[in-house]
Image (tube, rainbow, N blue to C red):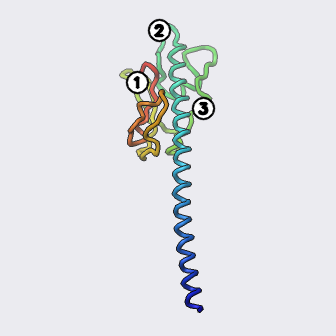
Amino acid sequence: MQGFTYIGVLVLVALMGIALAATGQVWHTAQQREKEQELLFIGHQFQLALDQYAKHTPVRGRRQPLQLEELLKDPRHPEVRRYLRKIYPDPMTGSAEWGLIVGPNGEILGVHSLSDDEPVKKSNFGLADRLFEGKMKYSDWVFMHASG
C-alpha cells in the first residue's frame, strides 16, 4: 500500500508542475500584451509631441528636434514649451534609449523600440496603427511625425 501512495504523490507533483508551467506561460503572455499596450501609448505620445513641435515652429526655425530632450523644453522659444512630460522608458527593453528615425538634417522624425523580440499582437490594430500589421519585431513598430 505504501508503494501506491508514493506513486500517487509523484503523479500529483507532476500534475502540479504541469499546471504551474501552464499558468506561468499564460502570465507571461498577459504581461507581454500589457507591455505592448504601453508601447503603443508611449509611441503615440512621442508621435504627438513631434507633431506639436513641428506645429509650433517659429519663422526660420527647425521643424523637428535634434534630440528627444528638446521635446521636454523647446529651445526655439523664449517661454517654456513642453511637448512631453518626460522621456518615457521603452517598456520592451526597460531602457530610456529609443531607436531614432533621423532625417537628412539630423532632425528626429520618429522613434521605435530597440527590442527585436517578436510581438504577440500582429493583427487587429486600430486605424492609426494599421502599418504594424504583420510586423515580426517590436523595432518594426515605428512611430513617425505625421509628415515624416
Q: Label 3 sits on what residue type?
A: Lys
Query: Residues at badges 2 and 1 in contact (C-beta under 8 Å)?
Result: no
Secondary structure at badge 2 equals loop
Disc 2 versus disc 3: nearer the observer: 3
Alpha-carbon span between mark 2 and mark 3: 27 Å
Q: Residue at x 54, y 39 (%)?
A: 37
Q: Residue at x 38, y 21 (%)?
A: 105
Disc 3 versus disc 1: nearer the observer: 3
Query: Residues at badges 3 and 1 in contact (C-beta under 8 Å)?
Result: no
Look at the picture and state if 147 lies above or below 128. above
Q: Residue at x 51, y 32 (%)?
A: 43
Secondary structure at badge 3 equals loop
Residue 21 spot, x, y in % from top left: 52, 64
Look at the picture and state if 124 lies above or below 30. above
Q: Label 2 sits on what residue type?
A: Arg
Secondary structure at badge 1 equals loop
Residue 106 bears which disc, if any? 1
Q: Give the quarter of the figure containing the C terminus.
A: top left
Name the quadrant containing residue 136: top left
Q: Give the quarter of the figure containing the N terminus.
A: bottom right
**Left or right of residue 130: residue 34:** right
Question: Sequence order check: which comes first, mark 3 or mark 1?
Answer: 3
**Which of the two residues, 75 or 99, is positioned nearer the viewer here?**
99
The residue sitting at the left extreme is 104
Q: Which residue has dot 3 on it?
A: 86
Q: Which residue has dot 2 on it?
A: 60
The residue sitting at the top extreme is 59
Look at the picture and state if 18 lies above or below 116. below
Q: Label 1 sits on what residue type?
A: Gly
**Left or right of residue 116: residue 79:** right
- Numbered label tally: 3
